[in-house]
Amino acid sequence: MGLTPVHFFSHGSTMMLGEQSESADYWRKCGEEALARNIQGVIVMGAHWDCLGDHIEVATNPNPGKSPVAYVRPDKYIQYELNPDIPTAERCIAMLAAEGFTVRGNPTFDWIHDVYLILIHMFPAGCPPTTIVSMNARYDPHYHVKVGATLRPLRRENYLLIGTGGAVHNLYRNRWAPMLRFRDNFAMETPPEDWALEFRQAVEDVITKTSGPQLRRAMTRLMKHPQFREAHATDDHFMAAMFVAGAMGDWEDAGTAAEMGAESWELTNMCNSQFTFGSWEKEIAV
């Protein structure tokens, strides 16, 4: 069996859960392709769960709840049944510990919309076995690259690795009025500002024009881009990109193509770009 592809998805605002968009269509397409290959499960790093100090955690709650979602009707997500993969979580803990990470399970963690928003769109008929890995709140890009690199071998076992964060995600620079007044997150009274367009292009260039170890170097270097702090007021939504770079940045991955499959701008300056690294083998499981 070959290596599974890896996704870096920009989940955007909470309204992306309840609204139709090109991004939502692409998430569903990616989910259908994964199910057609009988994936073993999903391993995901989001942008809303981090741990203080020098450690990370892996979700081990067998019956997790869902954190509430603003501006979305509850019927869009309340009934969706989560499917935590505890055996794979324990395996991830062992793999990370073997590489020197201070890591532990979290048996009380409830899932947050950055993860289940994506899963609902990808797998509307039912959640596949899913393992969630936290970030570390020091937001060291190389640390999070190493997390992805450590879990990369699971791609060979038909696990789908996903990072869900944001290409351009600065809540302080968004235009909130149309969403607050009219529940319209896609309204564009003005074009996106130059800093958002510039950093969005830099992200696409790195992802589509580099691969293997070069991808890891280029992705971490984006945090030194002149417009990074405008595009990301906090580092949390870019750590998922580091996780993905680790999972896709081995020498074996050199030359692997990546594509931007969809993109949705919302709140004027939030750019939700959706990327896939690699591709599935042609054979489809029956």
Image (tube, rainbow, N blue to C red):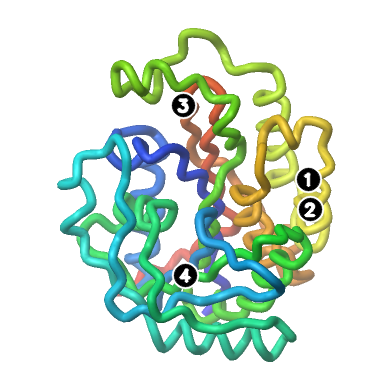
Residue hosting label 3: 266
**Three-letter amino acid code at the position of disc 4:** Ile
User: Which residue is outermost to the front?
Assistant: 53
- Mark 4 and mark 3: Cα distance apart in space: 26 Å
- Which quadrant of the rendered structure holds the C terminus? bottom left
**First-in-chain label (2 vs 4):** 4
Residue hosting label 2: 220
- Give the structural element (helix, strand or loop) at label 3: strand
As drawn, is 120 to the left or to the right of 103? left
**First-in-chain label (3 vs 2):** 2
In front: 210, or 163?
A: 163
Q: Residue at coordinates 46% horizontally, 79% vertically from top-left? A: 106
**Three-letter amino acid code at the position of disc 1:** Met
Residue hosting label 4: 132
Q: Using a 10 Å C-alpha cutoff, classify the residue at mark 4 as few (fewer than 14 neighbours), some (14 to 19) or many (20 or more).
A: many
- Give the structural element (helix, strand or loop) at label 2: helix
Position of residue 233 measured from the top left corner of the image (x, y, whole percent): 66, 37
Residue 128 visible in rendering: yes
Residue hosting label 1: 223
- Mark 3 and mark 1: Cα distance apart in space: 22 Å
- Give the structural element (helix, strand or loop) at label 4: strand
- Mark 2 and mark 4: Cα distance apart in space: 22 Å
As drawn, is 63 to the left or to the right of 189? left
- Mark 3 and mark 2: Cα distance apart in space: 25 Å
Q: Using a 10 Å C-alpha cutoff, classify the residue at mark 3 as few (fewer than 14 neighbours), some (14 to 19) or many (20 or more).
A: many
**Three-letter amino acid code at the position of disc 2:** Thr
